[in-house]
Image (cartoon, rainbow, N blue to C red):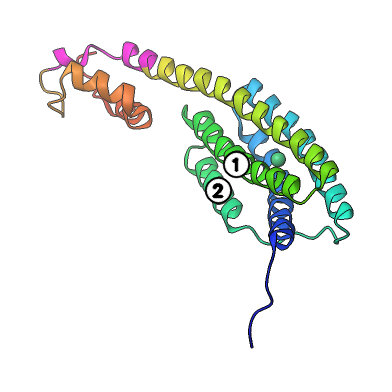
Amino acid sequence: MTKPEKHLQDLFHETLRDIYYAEKKILTSLPKMAKAAQSPDLRAAFEKHERETEGQVERLEQIFALIEEPAKGKTCDAINGIIDESKEIMTEFKGSPALDAGLLASAQAVEHYEIARYGTLKTWADELGLAQAVKLLDETLQEEKKTDAALSELAKVAVNQEAIEVTAGCALRADPITTIDSPSAMSRNDWQRSAKWEPSMSHSLVSDWPSHGV
Ligand SMILES: [Fe+2]
């Protein structure tokens, strides 16, 4: 038996179901990310985006009504994967200076997925002559882009803050290079390089560094 032909409107409907599922999943995840965030600004950004996401779900429901389909999601493995990764970060980096940078990276992965989906849906809605849907999708698309830009700014602060904490940790210790019997042959340059590129590793090295000679 041959499969029925599928057209652009079928693809539009399927993708609408995908992003509807994704938005609802994000709604359950954002409060957890807000609770985990160490920076008050990052927590506020997650809380603000949670309120926006509620509006985005409502817009999607309006689009389902426009195409006379029930508002029903379809499992989106992509968003499940991104959210599983964010849960992993919250567990593995709990209490660590790099936690906020990790949360921001996860949130931006979510935003980029949504931007891709909404951009596509908007183009397809236009092709299908769904002018009202184009308007609604564009409102959400602009919101997602703004959120992404705000997260980029917060990410710079979070990474800088993390670097400051690592540097402060180094300064509190003795000058490691003068400790002749240090457990590592790491030179000052190697040390600084690792602090720059491997913040979490260097942080653990700070606490592992020998206290004698300090
Ligand atoms: Fe969204």
Q: Position of residue 57 (x, y in %)?
A: 80, 45
Q: Which amino acid type is shown beneath numbered disc 2?
A: Ile
Q: Work out whether mark 2 precedes mark 1 in sequence or the reverse, and give the earlier one.
A: 2
Tell me, yes or no, if residue 139 can be seen here: yes
Position of residue 64 relative to residue 151, above or below, is below
Q: Quadrant of residue 71?
A: bottom right
The residue that appears at 26% across and 18% down in the rendered structure is 192
Q: Which mark is residue 110?
A: 1
Question: Which dot marks residue 82?
Answer: 2
**SS class of the residue under badge 1?**
helix
Asked if residue 137 is among those painted magenta in the image, a careful observer would answer: no
CB under 8 Å between discs 2 and 1:
yes
Where residue 10 appears, as percent x and y from the top left, is: 72, 63
Is 4 placed above or below 64 here?
below
Q: Position of residue 58 (x, y in %)?
A: 85, 44
Decide if residue 21 is on the left or right side of residue 102.
right
**Image point 30% across, 14% down: which residue?**
173
Q: Dot 1: within a 10 Å radius of its alpha carbon, few (fewer than 14), some, or many (20 or more) residues?
A: many
Residue 176 on the magenta span = yes
**Count the marks: how many?**
2
Q: Residue at x 19, y 14 (%)?
A: 213
Ligand 1 near label 1 (Cβ, under 8 Å)?
A: yes
Q: Is residue 26 above or below residue 207?
A: below
Along the line of sight, the residue nearer the viewer: 59 or 53: 59
Name the quadrant where ligand 1 sits.
top right
Which secondary structure class fits the magenta region best? helix
Task: Give percent across and percent down for residue 194.
Answer: 27, 25
Near mark 2 (Cα within 10 A), the count class, few <14, some 14-19 or many ≥20, is some
Residue kind at label 1, given as amino acid type: Val
